[in-house]
Amino acid sequence: MPFPPTHPALAKALGAQGYLEPTPVQEAVLAAEPDRDLLVSAQTGSGKTVAFGLAAAGPLLGEAERFERAQAPLFLAIAPTRELAMQVSRELTWLYAPAGARIVTCVGGMDARQEQRALSAGAHIVVGTPGRLRDHIERGNLDLTALKVVVLDEADEMLDMGFREDLEEILDSTPKERRTFLFSATIAKDIAALAKRYQKDAVRIDTIRRDEAHGDIEYRAVRVAPNEIENAVVNLLRYFESPGSLIFCATRERVRHLYGSLRERGFSVVQLSGELSQKERSDALQSLRDGHARACIATDVAARGLDLPELGLVIHADLPTNTAGLLHRSGRTGRAGRKGTSVVIVPYTKRRPAERLFATANLDVEWSGPPLAEEIRAKDQARMLEDPLLNEAPSPEELELAERLLADRTPQAVAAALIRLHRSRLPAPEEMFGDVPDHRGPSDRGQDRGQDRAPRAPRLDRGPRPDLPGAGSDAAWFRLPVGRSKNADPKWLVPLICRLGHVTKKDIGVIRIFDHETKFEITREAEPRFLESIKSASDAGEIRINPASSPGAAPPSRADRGLGPRPPGGPGGPRPSGPRPDAPRGPRPPYKPGGPRSDGPPRKGPPKGKRKPN
């Protein structure tokens, strides 16, 4: 449907930008009763900036074609981050340009004195972040007495980031007769409380279906070994070859490390984190918009409010902490009617938390292994054969040069050179082990919860080498908190141990994988540097490796101990007599609270709990 009637100046701007019909949120906002406050829940990328810009035209312009001379602001838009505030400012600039609007942006990280001078010269519209706006109000630079419209964009994000006090002070400084538009992805209790306090008779508009995932986003989960996350990111970027990709990491350190690794491999990438200056952040985003960079690596905070039109792929290099984080990250793609893909990289050790996350978000997720090198090469061949350059009509100069090339070379040699040139611009895919599906049946999953089962000896996955004997030798034992229940396997455990401990394969001896842990040997020669390296790795949030005692020999079976089949009754059945083979103990005298102990004076107070085994 065409746009509903709106102010002539804004209709002219919409036509110049090629807007033919409104998005659902724009249609709902324009259909609301005039002179009413709005409480709107809408997804990011749904066109809400244009929506509240159109809704504000009535109280701002009335019947006038253009604004009068700029004095105190008439319209205030508040956004949670610098990037989102600047994006809102750009959208309102072209929308209100035919009406002669003067717009001032006030965000943290920019020159406050320059903003002060701009405000002193007068403004019709002010866009800013809560902290910087509050600072200008307290310094007397921003006069809000003439405001007619206030917009809180992504109000839920502002409350999550701790801006409640700033927002309350700003809103308390505005006239009571104003109109207030509150836009939020979710209308939680704190948002409803804010709306109740600062809005009057608001129209509630909900454009999000709570029982449906974003229809324009395809969700995928990729199983990988914990030490192959970086390789999985490489292969995903190469497999999809999206014009724009966003990669999320949990910490700044992870952003820096992945940025360096991808740059080293030849990817054109930029990074975003809170430690960068405003100029560095702006330059990084501009590189993405211009196409000079194909991927951006960012933390959750740095990526709030980003609007990158060509973003077709989101990669979660680190698992999101909650459902809101998953949906917010993924919502950077699939915007304004475009399709997008959100890929969550799931280490084998975090399979179950990931499944719970997807179930809570009610997402239909496709599980698979990482793209393999041969699959990427096949994609490269298909993309090269479909390249539009092959179908373009050549110019006379190009035909002349082509004839000169073919004069001394065969067509096959020229085509082969073209293939080599095409491949030289592409980073090489990583060789990966591929998918290792979860083969456990329902009975095995029940055993993970502690149900009774027959004794199971630990598996010896790597035999001893001549220079490093097996258990009980002069080698140090260590443990990893992953076992068979988390798909532990030597093919990814060995590279993981080498990376975390800064050792080589020859420094690792026997590896024994148990149900919930893995124990392995390190040579005494490598032990000092291994201890230092694993301490640094655990401080950086990696999987924790701890020293451990020798696992000893495998426990004998019931037949080896001269016992018959296990009696019925499970855990409640009778136990065989005699000392336990894996932990022999001497006789223990009967214990009475407060009574005599075998090794000292009577115990005072309640008995201590049992010590946990290694």
Image: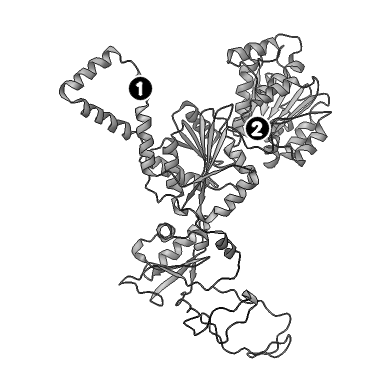
Q: Residue at x 59, y 71 (%)?
A: 452
User: In the image, is residue 18 above or below residue 610?
Assistant: above
Quadrant of image for the C terminus: bottom right
* Residue type at numbered disc 1: Leu
Residue wearing tag 2? 43
Q: Residue at x 33, y 22 (%)?
A: 390
- First along the sequence among labels 1 and 2: 2
Q: What element carries label 2?
A: loop
Quadrant of image for the N terminus: top right
Q: Is mark 1 on a helix, strand or loop?
A: helix
* Residue type at numbered disc 2: Gln
User: In the image, is residue 537 above or below residue 517?
Assistant: above
**Mark pair 1, 2: CA separation:** 37 Å
Which residue occupies the foreground of this view, 405 or 89? 405
Residue 116 seen: no
Residues under numbered marks 1 and 2 in contact, where contact means CB atoms less than 8 Å apart: no
Which residue occupies the foreground of this view, 38 or 580? 580
| Residue 84, quarter of the rendered image | top right
199 to the left or right of 224: right
Residue 559 x/y as whole percent: 48, 81
Residue wearing tag 1? 389
Q: How crowded is mark 2: few (under 14 residues within 10 Å), some or many (20 or more)?
A: many
